[in-house]
Amino acid sequence: MTAFRLPLAFRLAARELRSGVRGFRIFLACLALGVAAIAAAGSTAEAFRHGLASQAREILGGDLSVSVENRDFTTKERAAIERLGPVTYSAGARAMAANTAGDRRLVMIRGVDGRFPLAGAVKLDGSPSLAAALADHDGVAGAAVEPALLDRLHLKIGDRFQAGAMTLVVRARLLGEPDGLSRGFAIAPRVLVRADVLEQSGLLAPGGLSSRTVRVALPATQDPRAAGQALQKAFPDANFRIRDRVDAAPGARRLIDQLEYFLGFIGLASLVAGGLGVAGAVSAYLSARAPAIAVLKALGARSGLIRDLHLIQIGVLALLGVSIGLVIGGAAPLILGKLAGSSLPVPALFKIYPAPLAKAAAFGLLAAAAFSLIPLARARATPPSALFRRAPKRRPPLGVETLGAGLAGAGLAALAVVAAPTPIAAAIMMAGVAVAFGLLALIGRAAAFAAGRARGLTRGPVKLGLANLAGPSSAAHTASPAIGLGVALLACVVLIQSALLAQVSDVAPRTAPAMVFTEIPADRTEAFDATVAEVAGPLNAATYLRMPFATGRIVAVKGKPVDTQAIKPSQRWAFDNDISLSLFAREPANAGVVEGHWWPANASGPPQVAMSVEIAQAAGLKVGDTITVLVLGREIEARIAALRKIDFGGFGPNFALIFNPATLEGAALRNVAIVRLDKDREASLTRKLGERFPGVNVISVREQLEAAAALFDRLALAVRGAAAVAGLAGVLVLAGAIAAGARARAREAATLKVLGATRAQILVAYLIEYGSVGLIAGSAGVLFGFAAAWPVVVKIFEARWSVDWSGVLLLLAGATTLTTVGGLIAASLALSQRPAPVLRGD
């Protein structure tokens, strides 16, 4: 028997497959949908990664980038860097730009030398070259200006404007810089000028906020990572910020990794939700094949032949479904590339990438095995007599099929964890989906049980609908877990989006300052306060705060040099960069002290510091420990007197370090200030400060929040679209459940007609059954969405929890409506057939 079983199984399977995929359409759709989502997410991310890698030199502006803050390179540093290869120097500072009408706007001024750029090209409109755009015209230096500033100040090419103490003329529109992506997010439009013009402006003077960067073109044989490490070793105290072309845009790369994982996770959740559709389609097909299986068994066919016959069919159709998903998922990024063109913010190389497609195929095949082998085990183990009698389904027996299903499920989870950028987070998310899926299944069974108990208290079509809900083929068993999971994912995305958007557009404007002022001269602070009071009214601690400002770098903790390798990469920002600091005598409002005590107002003696609790935890520091900070060219050792929880979105001193005034006694520090002000008075205060304090930079927080809200809303739209895939999987499962039960429903409707039931009564019964399923699954999904979204909003983003009730109710209404429509479809299919043929055929 063993010698010819597989060939016979192949021949029988080939005959069955000649009839087409009728009965397996839902199987194919559920499988293809999940695979397509995973493949599209992976392929798009791969296109962006290859785009970044292919233009790494252009993105960085060279092979190596070395930056310093608030100082210039020394002669020795310049000599060491220039020995590596051709270089280009640039410098950056903030200033207020103003037109002839007095309108003002903060800008980022960048001065470049004649060798800029070493790699790539500056995109300009209105000038034949960068040199021509930046040349002097009638004794006035030229500038290339981003369109956002031109629009804000109503400037055009040829117009003059002020930027700090400089008078400039617009000679070109700045459309793009080769190293723009590597610098990350900018809070203001950019203005490009010659380096000598910026040097003479006074904006790079000591005490202000400025930066200088040198980019190097290395020989082809030189390793950029090794060259950067050698520079760090040669100048250990220089506080260089070094980047190389290997990781030219780390922020963009991290964002791509996280976005791929999140979208891929939604695709995987869709695949899991669609797994019920896969299982339902296989069960329905095997149920329809029950007489044929019974005949084969009665004629002596062994269980192995039955298994092999249908396993071959399922395997072939699974390969077909996965192939369809791979074609759709592989083509989606190509279509995106055609539609988006060059408007994408990150360079991308759109083509077919085998690795993400192979990963998506593995997910699809494992999901098909995990959800289709259990129904196959049940059919193989059912005796012929039970198949002929259409006996109720039994529990699947333990055997090779159930073992294979378990291994496939474990492989699915393991692959999701291994392929994720953060395995721990992936394991938590997978566990959450598994628990939610199990609870949704239990809720469906509980609803069926409650319906069975409640039907005795009702009459007519209501009783019939509750009886259907309690039955073994109820949609509460077959579709509610998938519908609930789809609603849960959508609810989670909607709730996170609405909470963060509310934080940016509602909470932050009420709690954060409306305007921030920097570069306030230390000798004119009282005049500055008086100017603000003229527009804002009487000043108090709730609406106005002015503070000394400086930057420094933590170079030692507990008397030992900082070892950044011992600190988590996500927390190293406070130790490998200059951070903000200030001086306060008295404890300010909203200080956020969580441990320790503030020093007395007249404290003198050794330096003391109030430190951010997050920075302290990163370095293992506590109250009483010491840190050494390099500030204004000298190292200061201070004892930690207090640890603070900083609310960066609030109205308070958001400095990483605050010292007692005696620490920097005698230093004439520039000040910063924050003010709460309504929108109508912003322009008036900006104009007045421009007249009296032209060197003070004005940052409109309201504008930044509005821009962030618009960007977040666009990103959330794409994420919501991806999450809707999970909802579509639930709809497919519902459609599969309706199709699988169509024959039984038709027989049931025919029997009810014969017994005198009207079409209206049957229709009401179906609406009650499916409407209840939608309401129960939707409510459970919303609750799970709440449970998943709350820790993300409150713990990870540290935002205030708020709920978009309109979006939640819309989701709940959508789930109920979709399942109710499913009930109408099921009823119409059942009622469209005449009773006599249905009952005779059975």
Image: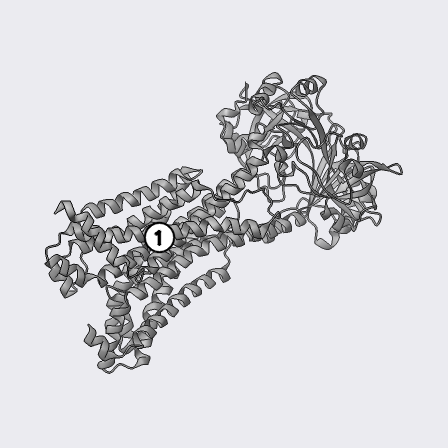
Residue type beneath disc 1 = Leu
Q: State the image coordinates of residue 368 (x, y, percent, origin top left).
A: 31, 50
Tell me where residue 825 sits by quadrant: bottom left
Residue 829 appears at what percent x and percent y? 32, 73
Name above or below for residue 792 compared with residue 631.
below
Residue at numbered disc 1: 320
Task: Give percent across and percent down for residue 180.
Answer: 65, 38
Q: Residue at x 64, y 51 (%)?
A: 706
The percent coordinates of residue 12 (x first, y second) are 21, 55
Rendered position, 275 above or below 137: below
Question: Which residue appears at 58% of the width and 51% of the height?
Answer: 340
| Foreground pick, 650 / 398 | 398
Q: Is residue 446 visible?
A: yes
**Quarter occupied by residue 120:** top right
**Figure quadrant of the C terminus:** bottom left
Residue shown at 51%/54% (left/top)?
A: 802
Image: 71 above or below 471 = above
- Check disc 1 and report its element: helix, strand or loop: helix
Front residue of this view, candidates 465 and 300: 300
Would you call the spot at circle 1 few (<14 residues within 10 Å), some (14-19), or many (20 or more)?
some
